[in-house]
Image (cartoon, rainbow, N blue to C red):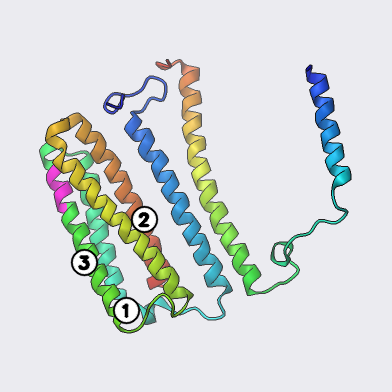
Amino acid sequence: MIPYTVERRADTGVTNVRLGIWLFLASEVMLFGALFSSYALLRVSAPAWPHGLEVLGVWFGVTHTIVLSLMTALVLRARSAPAGQARTLLAAGSFLAIVFLVTKGVEWRGEIAQGLVPSVNTFFAMYYTLTGLHALHVVCGLVANAWAVLGARRVGDAMTAGRIYSIGLYWALVDLVWLAIFLLFYLT
Amino acid sequence: MTLARRRSAFGGFLAACWAAASASALACPICFRVEEGPVTDGVRAAVLVLMGVTAGVLAGFGVFIARFVRRAAAGDDVA
């Protein structure tokens, strides 16, 4: 078993779980940072750039933003809730994440049916790359939620609290990335 | 090898590199800002975004390291 998953390490002052999740989030920020940098390169150098308000369904974007923000709020709330309630909140958050994926799938299906595929222009190439990678993160978050809820009985409340803390931070990052995508692709 | 000798050897190595280097440095036109245009502007914007992200992450690490230094200075349960 990995040590210091529940109690703090004397030298770092934090548990290994907290240290690990912050390092992981730093790597995630660099990953999305590189993609947003590519977006800046393509957008600024493009002779013409479509307006998201005209080519994308802005109401889909608004719906995704509301659903994902609610989901993140539930998971963050779970961090300070008693063990049983925390698992319920996490399960409710997972349901909202599934709603996000379903509505995103409906949106993609409509766009592809209109012929708006990645090969149309660099706008759609970046749009599908970023929203696809983001959706993959939502799927991974769902797996993490299930892991925390289903493994709660086996590992106990203290370790589950650490897992929920980490998952909350992860969802906050996923939500922030979505807000950036919404702003850059749907509103400008 | 003493420290003074190591420094001399390193200085000699740098001098040899300088002597062997080409008289003119070559850079691609975009990096060298010879060609002003949309691609140059795009590269500049991309570099700025990536530098901003990197600076943010490094600042986070800086805060974390400062926290360690404070803990060590205070003698807080440091193993």
The residue under the point 28% across, 23% down is A7
* Label pair 3/2, CB-CB below 8 angstroms: no
- Distance from the alpha carbon under mark 3 to that under mark 1: 15 Å
Count of labels in the image? 3
- Which three-letter amino acid code belongs to the residue tagged 3? Val
The label nearer to you, 2 versus 1, is 1
Instruction: State which quadrant residue A116 falls in.
Output: bottom left
The answer to whether dots 3 and 1 both sit on one chain is yes
Q: Is residue B55 above or below residue A3?
A: below
* Label pair 3/1, CB-CB below 8 angstroms: no
Q: Chain of mark 2?
A: A
Residue closer to the observer: B24 or B1: B1
- Which three-letter amino acid code belongs to the residue tagged 1? Ile
Q: Chain of mark 3?
A: A
Residue A182 placement (x, y as % from top left):
37, 66
- Distance from the alpha carbon under mark 3 to that under mark 2: 20 Å
Judged left or right of residue A78, residue B56 is right
The label nearer to you, 3 versus 2, is 3
Segment tinted magenta in the rendering: A87-92
Disc 2 on helix, strand or loop?
A: helix
What's the mark number on residue A102? 3
| Quarter of the picture holding the C terminus of chain A | bottom left
Residue A63 within the magenta-colored segment of the rendering = no
Judged left or right of residue A122, residue A4 is left
**Can you identify the residue that label 1 sits on?**
A112
The residue under the point 27% across, 79% down is A110
What's the mark number on residue A176? 2
Residue closer to the observer: B38 or B75: B38
The residue under the point 73% across, 71% down is B35
